[in-house]
Image: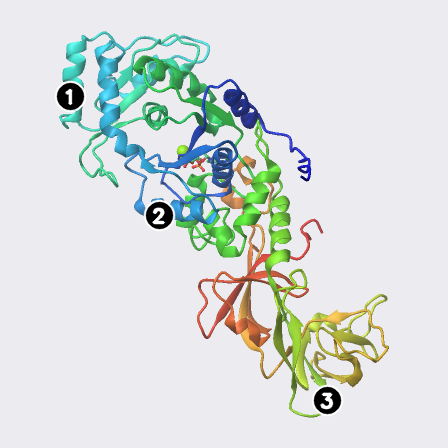
């Protein structure tokens, strides 16, 4: 029997280390994680990190991951967001075990809070929020007790029932945990558990007018689902003490909270609140604008799920806040697209070339679809006497080392022949309007017997068969690395050239069969995909990413 190949072990991250120790100690047989988005916006690349982490851990160590909508705030949540979130998680390539909603636990949570009241651990307060804030103290000074803190259990029950029954307006009363107003952790100073909100909820309708706060919903939902490792971002570190307090007082399943650093990316913003402003104020065309850092925007732009997963994997997770260069994400996208996309030729800024010695009506040539994939086959490419090349592939007076077209210079037309520029035509304004070239008949690609070596290879299209398409060139949405840390409004730093439209470009006819979302490499131009706004008579291609990283230049 062959020896198993030794695996090169990638160093594990701190969460994997915790889980491996837990499993070794026999604390769990398998693990349960959850991805808990609040359905108040579309998912972004930061969420993708959390998704890859949570689902990746249960894939690696056995167990499962739930998708739980953290929908305890009735005002900001919408069904549209729920649907988009499900689509994005699936697209990223993950399957959740259960689709759950924190709002499904409202009855259970209500039962839990009655236990706290019964045990003298919660009370109904009626301080207005500003007075409550005043009594809260500061990190260096203890807070003061509310005058309503010592009501009897019976009175608390009665008032809380009345809150639930809708007897009071929004904000008139709250239910607070009775912990310690002098606690060093400000979050432990009698946090609010329930508030009154006469609002319609996307799932529970008008059943409730009291809603639990994050700290009385999140950890409890984890317990109900018997989540073993509840992973969140660093800003929740101070909440962990409260999370544990609730579990111990309620005597429910002991889930544990672990924190990692949020994913930040250069040249963009990531908070849903900011992304919503970009959408509402029409700086972008919507949540799925190809310039957005949302998963749906990246998908529309042509980023692949494999590239996003690879990016998350390469960056890993950290315990300290940091900002990752978007160039790394683009690198992952380029690397994947190079492997999988078919090649096509598109001329962005056309200059007509007449091949003066080419007789006949034309011929069909063939080009390999993808040199990286031997099974990708060939496509037919029409060739004829009149073609377009790029305007900047010609220079009247060539500079040194310019190996493209110039009077007397030869180039190869990709998948076709070698041509020599003999002459050019100018209009009255002095612009070059046409090149006259001759071709070398024995130089046909694949059966070249000409013995001529040229240094330049150009992409081109045959004019008669070319289809006119629109190209959208995207650049970074912001012109500074970290718009959120700059002075003033982050929107002042939007890059005015983040979208450039080329309305009239010419594509080889094989592109007429492109499907929405399908990606291609346009030779010498970059990676592009067919945009969902395309119509049969107007194809629109998005530039996914350039061929090389030329941002630095
Ligand atoms: P935002 O501030 O963008 O609105 P959020 O944290 O409020 O983000 P949620 O819907 O509550 O968004 O997040 C769902 C999960 O995704 C949480 O577990 C959260 O920790 C995680 N998450 C959100 N943003 C990031 C990020 N930038 N990096 C890593 N994880 C994130
Ligand atoms: Mg949130």
Are the residues tagged 3 and 2 within 8 Å (C-beta)?
A: no
Q: Is residue 450 left or right of residue 236?
A: right
Location of ligand 2 given as a quarter of the image: top left
Name the residue: 83% across, 77% down.
409
Figure quadrant of the N terminus: top right
Picture coordinates of residue 177, whole percent (x, y): 30, 15
Q: Is residue 96 above or below residue 175?
A: below
Q: Which residue is mark 1?
A: 161
Q: Earlier in the sequence, mark 2 or mark 1?
A: 2
Helix, strand or loop status at disc 3: loop
Circle 2 residues within 10 Å: few <14, some 14–19, many ≥20: few
Q: Is residue 234 left or right of residue 213?
A: right
Identify the residue at the far bottom of this view: 360
Residue 335 visible to an observer of this rendering: yes
Q: Which residue is mark 3?
A: 358
Q: Earlier in the sequence, mark 3 or mark 1?
A: 1
Q: Which residue is mark 2?
A: 83
Label 2 to label 1, Cα distance in Å? 35 Å
Picture coordinates of residue 96, whole percent (x, y): 40, 40
Would the CB of label 2 be found within 8 Å of ligand 1? no
Helix, strand or loop status at disc 1: helix
Tag nearer the camera, 3 or 1: 3
Q: Is residue 540 left or right of residue 442?
A: left
Tag nearer the camera, 2 or 1: 2
Residue 123 visible to an observer of this rendering: no
Label 3 to label 1, Cα distance in Å? 91 Å
Label 3 to label 2, Cα distance in Å? 57 Å
Picture coordinates of residue 165, whole percent (x, y): 14, 27
Name the residue: 31% across, 17% down.
132
């Amino acid at each position: 029997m062959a020896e198993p190949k030794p695996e090169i072990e990638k160093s594990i991250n701190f969460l994997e280390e915790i889980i491996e120790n837990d499993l070794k100690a026999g604390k769990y047989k398998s693990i349960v994680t959850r991805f808990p988005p609040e359905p108040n916006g579309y998912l972004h690349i930061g969420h993708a990190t959390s998704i890859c982490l949570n689902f990746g851990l249960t894939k690696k160590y056995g167990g499962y991951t739930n998708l739980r909508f953290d929908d305890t705030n009735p005002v900001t949540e919408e069904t549209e967001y729920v649907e988009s979130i499900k689509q994005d998680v699936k697209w990223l390539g993950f399957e959740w075990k259960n689709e759950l909603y924190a709002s499904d636990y409202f009855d259970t949570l209500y039962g839990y809070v009655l236990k706290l009241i019964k045990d003298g651990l919660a009370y109904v307060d009626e301080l207005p929020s500003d007075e409550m804030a005043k009594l809260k103290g500061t990190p260096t000074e203890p807070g003061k007790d509310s005058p309503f803190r010592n009501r009897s259990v019976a009175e608390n029950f009665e008032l809380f029932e009345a809150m639930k029954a809708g007897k009071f307006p929004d904000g008139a009363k709250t239910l607070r945990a009775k912990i310690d107003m002098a606690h060093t952790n400000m979050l432990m100073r009698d946090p609010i558990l329930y508030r009154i909100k006469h609002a319609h909820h996307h799932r529970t309708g008008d059943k409730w007018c009291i809603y639990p706060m994050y700290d009385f919903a999140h950890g409890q939902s984890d317990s109900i689902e018997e989540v073993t490792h509840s992973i969140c971002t660093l800003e929740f570190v101070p909440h962990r003490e409260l999370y544990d307090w609730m579990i111990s007082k309620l005597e429910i399943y002991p889930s544990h909270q672990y924190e990692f650093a949020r994913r930040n990316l250069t040249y963009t913003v990531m908070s849903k609140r900011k992304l919503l402003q970009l959408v509402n104020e029409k700086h972008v065309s919507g949540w799925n604008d190809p310039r957005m850092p949302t998963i749906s925007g990246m998908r529309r732009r042509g980023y692949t799920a494999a590239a996003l997963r690879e990016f998350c994997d390469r960056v890993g997770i950290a315990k300290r806040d940091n900002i990752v260069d978007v160039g790394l994400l683009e690198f992952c996208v380029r690397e994947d697209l190079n492997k999988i996309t078919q090649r096509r030729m598109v001329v962005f800024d056309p200059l007509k070339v007449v091949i003066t010695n080419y007789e006949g009506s034309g011929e069909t040539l063939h080009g390999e679809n993808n040199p990286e994939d031997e099974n990708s086959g060939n496509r037919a490419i029409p060739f004829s006497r009149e073609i377009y090349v790029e305007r900047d592939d010609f220079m009247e007076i060539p500079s040194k080392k310019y190996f493209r077209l110039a009077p007397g210079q030869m180039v190869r037309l990709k998948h076709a022949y070698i041509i020599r520029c003999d002459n050019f035509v100018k209009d009255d304004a002095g612009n070059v309007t046409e090149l006259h070239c001759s071709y070398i008949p024995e130089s046909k690609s694949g059966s070249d017997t000409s013995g001529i070596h040229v240094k330049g290879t150009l992409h081109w299209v045959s004019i008669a068969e070319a289809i006119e398409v629109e190209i959208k060139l995207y650049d970074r949405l912001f012109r500074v690395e970290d718009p959120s840390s700059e002075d003033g409004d982050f929107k002042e730093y939007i890059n005015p050239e983040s979208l450039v439209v080329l309305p009239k470009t010419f594509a080889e006819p094989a592109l007429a069969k492109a499907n929405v979302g399908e990606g291609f490499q346009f030779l010498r131009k970059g990676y592009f995909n067919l945009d969902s706004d395309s119509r049969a008579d107007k194809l629109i291609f998005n530039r996914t990413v350039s061929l090389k990283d030329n941002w630095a230049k």
